[in-house]
């Protein structure tokens, strides 16, 4: 290829071997999403300590979990337009600093139901950036043939480890130092943010779409050093136009409407199930006769098995992208059936097995849905697509802990909880499984639909 040729950045990235630079950036995103997962799940371990001192009924306790998710919803929906317009890197750093500041403020100043919820809402404004933007970034970096597995290692591993870490801190440190220790430990994300400032580059596809070729040449040389000579004088094409502010409108144009609406409804149901389950699992298991340590450990177990389940599903999806919705549907249906089994059978061993299966199937599939969403849209509105999926899904996540609290308040027992969570997972599985092979295999468009411009 001659030195004056114009290179397609998508093809160059797709043909890359996963090398040292890919791994470094993957590890960095893993660490970012680890703190996201940690901060998202640690309110479940606060409930036990504050219900009596703060005089909370179960529905209010559910709002302790949901308050951060409300902030997450706002940020997930809104950040995509900013990231698609001004870049992934700066938006990610802004989200990290919001999380840093308000996590520390929660540890110091949250002394009542209202102050805790207000500070968690503000923290959620940062959290709502990290996970969807991490997914978008990894999707734009990884070779397409391994995009699902790379996303699992680069995003999901961190998020799952964060959930496990929250469980371990809840079990071993909160009895000694109180629930505030959860947030002092969470403030360790501050040193990480300085590393991100120094190391994280802009997304290569975003650089190409904006014509920032000097930065792109340097980055592509790191990602594909064997092609460095060709990049020194080459120009790049992305085949994409500058983003319109109406990126949300692009998601609902005829080309994408069916996929978008199906993904949004599925995410609503599955995140209702996930956050209803993870927010209440320690408390519900104590009611079922489990010990304090065992009950708090169930949350960590779910996060651990979720990564294994997500990796297994990602491997299948990478082999046949067109069948990804069917695989997703199967995972959620199996997970929902497992949760429903808790209505009829109890016992420590059975509880452990079902919680492990729920993490493997229900949470594991959610990780793959995030990457499936990112791969369904063009670069110029990909962040908006993932943000809307997680934003609409967070409505379900907000309602999950609250509705589960109301159901316990109304019925006095956990059975209604399992009916609601299992049913939501099954319906979510049927919904995403309804996508046809053509919908699932649709490649990301190279231009913004005319209707959205």
Image (cartoon, helix red, strand yellow):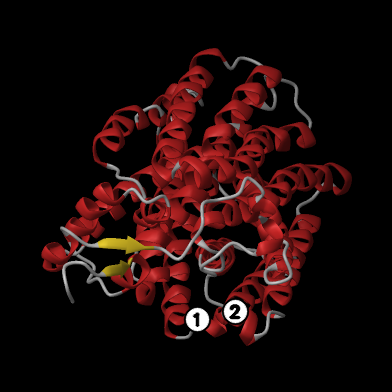
| Residues tagged 2 and 1 counted as in contact (Cβ below 8 A) | yes
Question: x, y percentage for residue 122?
Answer: 59, 26
Would you say residue 56 is visible in this rendering? yes
Q: Foreground residue, 261 or 234?
A: 234
Question: x, y percentage for residue 162?
Answer: 42, 46
- Look at the image and tell me in which quarter the C terminus lies: bottom right
Would you say residue 267 is visible in this rendering? no
The mark that comes first in sequence, 2 or 1, is 1
Question: x, y percentage for residue 21?
Answer: 20, 56
- Measured along the vertical axis of the image, is residue 161 above or below residue 269? above
**Residue 371 vs residue 152: left or right?**
right
Q: Which residue is mark 2?
A: 440
Name the secondary structure under disc 2.
Answer: helix
Question: x, y percentage for residue 409?
Answer: 84, 41
Q: Quadrant of residue 156?
A: bottom left
Q: Foreground residue, 131 or 234?
A: 234
Badge 2: residue crowd in 10 Å (few <14, some 14–19, many ≥20): many
Q: Quadrant of residue 253?
A: bottom right
- Measured along the vertical axis of the image, is residue 192 above or below residue 285? above
How far apart in space, not on screen, are marks 2 and 1 (Cα)? 7 Å
Please count the marks in the image.
2
- Measured along the vertical axis of the image, is residue 396 above or below residue 8? above
Q: Which mark is residue 321?
A: 1
Badge 1: residue crowd in 10 Å (few <14, some 14–19, many ≥20): many
Name the secondary structure under disc 1.
Answer: helix
Residue at image location 42% in from the left, 40% down from the top: 35
């Amino acid at each position: 290829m001659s030195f004056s040729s114009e290179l397609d950045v998508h093809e160059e990235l797709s043909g890359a071997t996963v090398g040292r630079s890919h791994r470094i950036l993957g590890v960095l995103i893993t660490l970012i999403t680890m703190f996201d997962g940690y901060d998202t799940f640690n309110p479940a371990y606060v409930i036990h300590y504050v219900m009596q001192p703060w005089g909370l009924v179960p529905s209010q306790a559910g709002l302790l979990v949901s308050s951060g998710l409300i902030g997450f919803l706002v940020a997930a929906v809104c950040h995509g337009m900013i990231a698609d317009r001004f870049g992934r890197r700066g938006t990610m750093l802004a989200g990290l600093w919001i999380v840093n500041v308000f996590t520390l403020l929660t540890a110091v100043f949250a002394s009542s139901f209202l102050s805790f919820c207000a500070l968690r809402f503000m923290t959620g404004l940062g959290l709502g950036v990290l996970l969807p933007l991490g997914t978008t970034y990894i999707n734009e970096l990884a070779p397409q043939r391994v995009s699902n597995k790379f996303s699992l290692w680069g995003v999901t591993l961190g998020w799952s480890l964060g959930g496990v870490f929250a469980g371990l801190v809840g079990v071993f440190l909160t009895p000694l130092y109180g629930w505030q220790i959860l947030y002092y430990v969470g403030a360790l994300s501050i040193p990480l943010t300085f590393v991100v400032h120094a190391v994280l580059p802009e997304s290569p596809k975003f650089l190409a779409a904006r014509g920032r070729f000097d930065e792109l040449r340097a980055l592509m040389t790191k990602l594909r050093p064997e092609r460095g000579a060709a990049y020194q004088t080459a120009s790049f094409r992305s085949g994409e136009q500058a983003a319109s502010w109406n990126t949300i409108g692009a998601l609902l144009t005829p080309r994408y409407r069916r996929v978008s609406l199906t993904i949004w409804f599925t995410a609503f149901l599955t995140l209702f199930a996930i956050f209803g389950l993870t927010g209440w699992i320690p408390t519900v298991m104590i009611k079922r006769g489990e010990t304090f340590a065992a009950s708090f450990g169930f949350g960590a177990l779910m996060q651990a098995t979720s990564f294994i389940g997500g990796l297994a599903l990602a491997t299948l999806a990478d082999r046949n992208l067109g069948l990804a919705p069917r695989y997703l549907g199967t995972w959620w249906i199996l997970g929902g059936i497992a949760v429903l089994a808790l209505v009829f059978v109890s016992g420590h061993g059975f509880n452990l097995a079902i919680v492990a299966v729920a993490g493997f199937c229900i949470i594991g599939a959610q990780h793959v849905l995030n990457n499936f969403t990112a791969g369904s849209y063009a670069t110029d509105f990909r962040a908006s697509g993932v943000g809307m999926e997680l934003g609409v899904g967070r409505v379900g996540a907000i309602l999950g802990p609250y509705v589960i609290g109301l159901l316990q308040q109304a019925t006095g027992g956990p059975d209604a909880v399992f009916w609601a969570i299992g049913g939501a997972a099954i319906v979510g599985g049927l919904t995403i499984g309804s996508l046809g092979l053509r919908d699932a295999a649709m490649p990301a468009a190279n231009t913004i639909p005319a209707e959205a411009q």
